[in-house]
Image (spheres, rainbow, N blue to C red):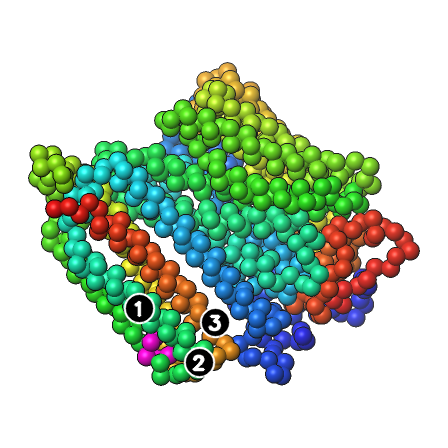
Amino acid sequence: MADSTTMAAPTEGHNPALLHHFAEPQQQRDAASLGMWIFLATEVMFFGGLFCAYLIYRLKYFGEFAAASQQLSVKLGGTNTVVLICSSLTVVLAVWAVQHAKRTLLLGSLVATIILGFCFLGIKAVEYREKFEKHHVPGPSFQFANVPVPGHPDLMANPYHAQMYFSLYFVMTGLHALHMIIGIGFFAWLLWAAYKGRFTPEYYTPLEMGGLYWHFVDIVWIYLFPLLYLIDLRK
Amino acid sequence: MANENNPQGERENYLNKHYGVWSWLLTTDHKRIALLYLLSVTFFFFIGGFFALLIRLELLTPAGDLVQADTYNKLFTMHGMVMVFFFLIPVVPAVLGNFLVPIMIGAKDLAFPRINLLSWYLYIVAGLLITHCMLTGGVDTGWTFYTPFSTAYTNTKIIEAGLAAFVAGFSSIFTGLNFIVTIHRMRAPGMTWSRLPLFVWAHYATSIIQILGTPVVAITIVLVAAERLFHLGIFDPKLGGDPLLFQHLFWFYSHPAVYIMILPSMGIISEIIACFTRKRIFGYNFVALSSIAIAVLGFLVWAHHMFVAGISVYAALIFSFLTYFVGVPSAIKVFNWTATLYKGSIRYEAPMLYAFGFLGLFTIGGLTGLFLACLGINVHVTDTYFVVAHFHYIMVGGVLMAYLGGIHFWWPKISGKMYPEGWARLGALIVFIGFNLTFFPQFILGYVGMPRRYYQYPPEFQVLNVLSTAGSTVLGIGYLLPMLYLLWSMRYGKPAPDNPWNAAGLEWKISSPPTTFNFEEEPVVTWEAYNYEELDTPQKEEVPVGR
């Protein structure tokens, strides 16, 4: 390749999306996909630190964690789980649509994904609001008095240990929600690019990468839901 | 192949192709980004060095007379933070690695040039944050941020410093991610894994640690910041939290971080030793795989920083054993380098002098690491100057010696100019003498019981402290000298030929300095790494590649 320009200088017949330093589109796609998987590995380690802290304190303070967990609404959390799984379906549909050059389905699926993402955040906001109202937000105004440990009616939960549960609850779900917001932003850009016709059955790498990210954020929730909502459900 | 003399103007290269500030600030060329990093890490090196010099000045006399106790706390904290996060971790990968990894594997650039630039900008944002933090009061917890002091008691700027480390961490993650993808996907035809230069292997191993370790310290910093902001109790025993959990999470990254620093330096040493002994590295496969072994084992030893923190005796035993185990791949490297020297045609150019310095100092640092891995000795010398001396032998004696050696070795390629050899040899000598004078007395100080992080001490320790302070001055001169003559050489140095050392490796087969895309044609590799026997056989004509 001539080195007369620093910008991408595709020779004739090349895909305009092929960057100058790659030999062929396949190499570029492989690089992007490997890069995304490695990024997801760092994300796993990022959340891994939190899950580690959660597991240690859950072992240490199981009674309080169960008592505090029962303050969450399994109904809202379960709905959110369904919402997210549906959004993963629409993401897959979007990728399938671009592979088969079905523009309407592509745009529709992307819009549906974004709407489902907002649904999730909305329901999450309702849950957070409830925590504020019940004084379950960690800090000076935290209250958790006279709540018995499940299965031990005479044993009252230690508010400090219940606060630990809510601290981890807010950090974990908050970080997850932050990832959702970034994902929605990315999908808004994908929608714009798809609307402009940037993606073809030959080139749709950003969509595929966005999909990987979205599925990852879903999977984090699939772990968060049972860990946070479904501790010791006997009533 | 070499057109050393070009009377009519300079050839076009990556340095003179475009001019102006924006051609640098918006560049996606890995070589220019490497130079941006070179400037920024050098800046932070001198900031961190300034703090170090103040620490040494305070310790010149037994009384605490130069600074007050809490100023001293801030000095060693900021020295540690700046040196670890802003110099030692990025220095070799982001400068030499950025410049050389793509060229060594025959690629035009890293896989993600824009992410590479982003990582430099993240570094700069982090640098501005830490500079602001320094100028407005600094932090006094030590660079380790131990809780609950950092979350519940100190009034210094923990969150800002933490944010700086967080952002710098993502800069480091992106560098590592870029290297892994580049090494996997961008190798030239014929550049198989067993033909990769050991420098590339070392960077591959480093990148694994960067992408798997750094996110853990990032989330730890998030938890510390959240705890401080919202009065959570995750690490505060008063609220049911566990400070040991913080230490586990912190050292899970911060111990492997030592290998982020030393592994790429070991890569440099392999290149230099092979070139200046004119031999293939003895036991290439073992040296390559020992890098990976260090990366993996490095993740299993973190709790040796916590032997006296209250972990169980059985956990301590296991971590002690595993720590000894890390010594094995490190020793494999040292033995193989030494074996390479055997019957080699050794030349004593400046890079080789630095490599010799590295061999000796790293060996001392590594062996005292084994002392510290031993539970009994560890308990005796915990938090003394013995520990300080040990990790400075690794981080300064190892990383900095190798980095300076590497900068000299590849300076002709980077700048297109030769550095003045006489001055460079003098500089290497001054650094070596200054280093040993500074840090060897600290082994003795620590062994006889001087604790670290104290700003005054009993008078019987003064002689050794004076020696150490004197050495640090010599060391400072040793670091200033290369900066001066390297800058001088950019203007007045002799033009460098393409391959001044007659070295093997793709980077020496392209022009000095390289053109923007490194290779004009995709190179095809048909030879093994370090084929010095072939290079030095006179009848064989070297096959030019990419030119």
Q: Secondary structure at mark 1?
A: helix
Disc number lying in front (3 or 1): 1
Q: Which residues are magenta?
A: A106-110
Of labels 2 and 3, earlier in sequence is: 2
Reading the image, the residue beneath label 2 is: A100
For this view, does B275 lie left or right of residue B147? right
The CA distance from mark 2 to mark 1 is 20 Å
Kind of residue sitting beneath label 1: Ser
What is the distance, in whole Å, between disc 3 and disc 1 at their CAs?
19 Å
Residue in the picture at 52% in, 31% down:
B323
Residue A205: give its label: 3
Q: Nearer the viewer, residue B93 or A56?
A: A56
Task: Give how far across and how far down residue A219 sits, in percent.
Answer: 34, 58
Q: Chain of mark 2?
A: A
Disc ID at residue A87: 1
- Badge 2 crowding class, 10 Å Cα cut-off, few under 14, some 14 to 19, many 20 or more, is few
Q: Are marks 2 and 1 on the same chain?
A: yes
Residue B141 is left or right of residue B85, and the answer is: left
Residue in the foreground of this view, choosing between B449 and B317: B317
Q: Residue, x 63% and y 75% (percent of image)?
A: A5
Identified at 68% across, 45% down, the residue is B285
